[in-house]
Image (spheres, helix red, strand yellow):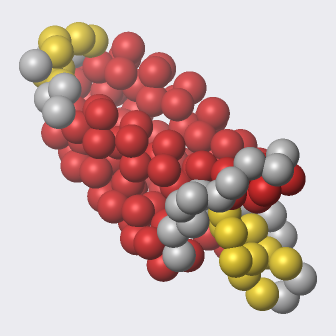
Amino acid sequence: MITTNIWLVFSVYLIYALISIPLFFITSGGWMSIFFYIAFAGLFYTTTTIFLFFSATARTAKRRTKVKIKGSFLPKIIGLQTFVILFNYGTCGDTICYQGFLPNLLEEASFPVIFTPPFIVVLLALLLYLAFLSMFLLDVA
């Protein structure tokens, strides 16, 4: 357990959200980036940041600014986000490309591509990532 100030958690989360949205956008392309990663994840980050701000404000009013963070959530969240970003799918015209971001980079650099997860696996990893991040934020708030 990590004990810290709620405003520190809010500040770090705000920076994390501001970095995560461009990462999702850069590693995907076309309508996929607009629908799945900007609209869906952007709406999620905006909503959770607002709720975390209100929680921090309410806790400050009650003079209870110390929070305990379960460290077990952090590696899962970072691992899932890394997986989703590295294997983020783009669009090839009107269809989904057959490979994600990292396999395309490796193929262009003439490296062998060993692992390319299907789109549904990356989408489920994104949903699992958002679920873990939600549970983490609920635990903090």
- Kindly identify the residue that appears in the image at 84 percent across and 88 percent down: 94
Q: Quadrant of residue 97?
A: bottom right
Please tell me which residue is depicted at 35% across the width and 21% down the height of the picture: 9
Q: Kindly identify the residue that appears in the image at 54 percent across and 61 percent down.
A: 115
User: In this view, which residue lies farthest toward the right?
Assistant: 93
Q: Quadrant of the C terminus?
A: top left
Give the side of residue 125 with respect to residue 44, left or right: left
Residue under the point 22% across and 49% down = 135
Does residue 39 appear anywhere in the picture? no
Q: Is residue 129 left or right of residue 73?
A: right
Q: Position of residue 104 (x, y in %)?
A: 76, 58
Total number of numbered labels? 0
Up the image or down, 71 lies above or below 110; here it is: above
Q: Is residue 67 visible?
A: yes
Q: Is residue 57 above or below residue 117?
A: above
Q: Is residue 105 above or below residue 53?
A: below
From the image, which quarter does the N terminus lie in? top left
| Residue at the limit of the structure toward the left, as seen here | 1
Q: Is residue 82 left or right of residue 104?
A: left
Query: Whole-percent x and y of residue 98?
Result: 70, 77
Which of 138 and 81 lies nearest the eye of the viewer? 81
Residue nearest the observer in this picture, 8 or 37: 37
Q: Position of residue 125 (x, y in %)?
A: 41, 62
Front-most of 76 and 19? 76
Which quadrant of the structure image shows residue 52?
top left
85, above or below 1, in the image:
below
